[in-house]
Image (spheres, helix red, strand yellow):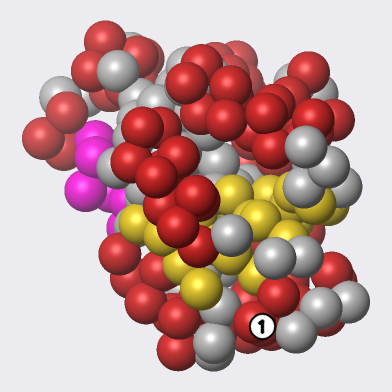
């Protein structure tokens, strides 16, 4: 196996704890039942780097009827990035062991610029020989083109990759292109899958 490619959110980081995500709606001055549908409805262009953080939050706040003050936008960007900083130590232990064995590791994540640069600054970022983010590629999983771009960046063939992601639609999209894939459900099952597939 030439490359093992990991997703970030939900694999290397935990899904946002309820208390972390709960900070965003009150910061915007609305209830969660109003906030989250609007947030997710506008998220894809932000993940793709098609809009800036300011433009994303202007859209969200505009739909919510909240003035997009610059200090509020800055606060929301900070809180949003922080929701994805809860690192899964068990996954990092697996990554560290793989790197020590000489495995070629890469990262492929749907992430806006602010989150991507935060991940780039983490100590664990050095474990990866390549880090690819949707905002930089202007492509996002599960679009098949993001996997074709990944293969090209790594100078590999699809069969040379093993892809780990926590979303079934992303795993299926990779498998269609001939990339062996693992649906992440935890570090212990991942160890077993890696032992079986490598």
Horizontal and vertical percent position of residue 69: 55, 24
Residue 74 visible in rendering: yes
- Residue at point 41%, 52% (across, down): 193
Residue sitting at the far bottom: 177
**Residue extending farthest left:** 33
Residue lying furthest front: 196
Image quarter (top left, top right, bottom left or bottom right) of the N terminus? bottom right
The answer to whether residue 37 is magenta is: yes
Q: Position of residue 77 (x, y in %)?
A: 57, 26
- Frontmost residue, 37 versus 97: 97
Left or right for 189, reference 84 = left
Q: Position of residue 172 (x, y in %)?
A: 37, 77
What residue is rendered at 46% in x and 67% in y? 181
Could you tell me if residue 28 is visible in this image? no
Using the image, determine if residue 23 lies above or below residue 165.
Answer: above
Residue 126 within the segment the image draws in magenta: no
Q: Which residue is depicted at the point 17% across and 28% down?
A: 32
The C terminus lies in quadrant: bottom right
Q: Relative to 17, say whether 49 is above or below.
A: below
Residue drawn 69% across the image and 50% down it: 107
Determine crowd level at label 1: few under 14, some 14-19, many 20+ residues with C-alpha closer than 10 A.
Answer: many
**Residue range of the region highlighted in magenta in the rendering:** 35-43
Q: Going by the image, does 69 lie left or right of 118? A: left
Displayed quadrant of residue 67: top left
Q: Main secondary structure of the magenta part?
A: helix
* Residue that carries the numbered disc 1 in the rendered image: 158
- Please tell me which residue lies in front, 156 or 191: 191
């Amino acid at each position: 196996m030439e490359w093992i490619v990991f997703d970030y959110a939900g694999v290397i980081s935990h899904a946002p704890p309820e208390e972390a995500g709960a900070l965003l709606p009150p910061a915007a001055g609305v209830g969660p039942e109003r906030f989250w549908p609007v947030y997710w409805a506008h998220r894809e262009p932000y993940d793709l780097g098609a809009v800036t953080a300011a433009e994303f939050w202007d859209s969200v706040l505009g739909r919510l009827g909240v003035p997009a003050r610059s200090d509020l936008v800055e606060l929301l960007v900070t809180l949003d990035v922080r929701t994805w900083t809860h690192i899964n130590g068990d996954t990092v232990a697996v990554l560290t062991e793989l790197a020590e064995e000489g495995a070629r590791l890469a990262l492929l994540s749907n992430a806006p610029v602010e989150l991507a640069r935060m991940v780039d600054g983490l100590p664990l970022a050095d474990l990866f020989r390549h880090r690819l983010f949707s905002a930089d590629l202007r492509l996002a999983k599960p679009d098949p083109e993001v996997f074709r771009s990944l293969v090209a960046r790594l100078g590999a063939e699809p069969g040379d990759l093993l892809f780990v992601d926590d979303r079934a639609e992303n795993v299926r999209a990779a498998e269609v292109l001939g990339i062996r894939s693992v649906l992440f459900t935890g570090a212990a099952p991942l160890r077993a899958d890696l032992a079986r597939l490598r």
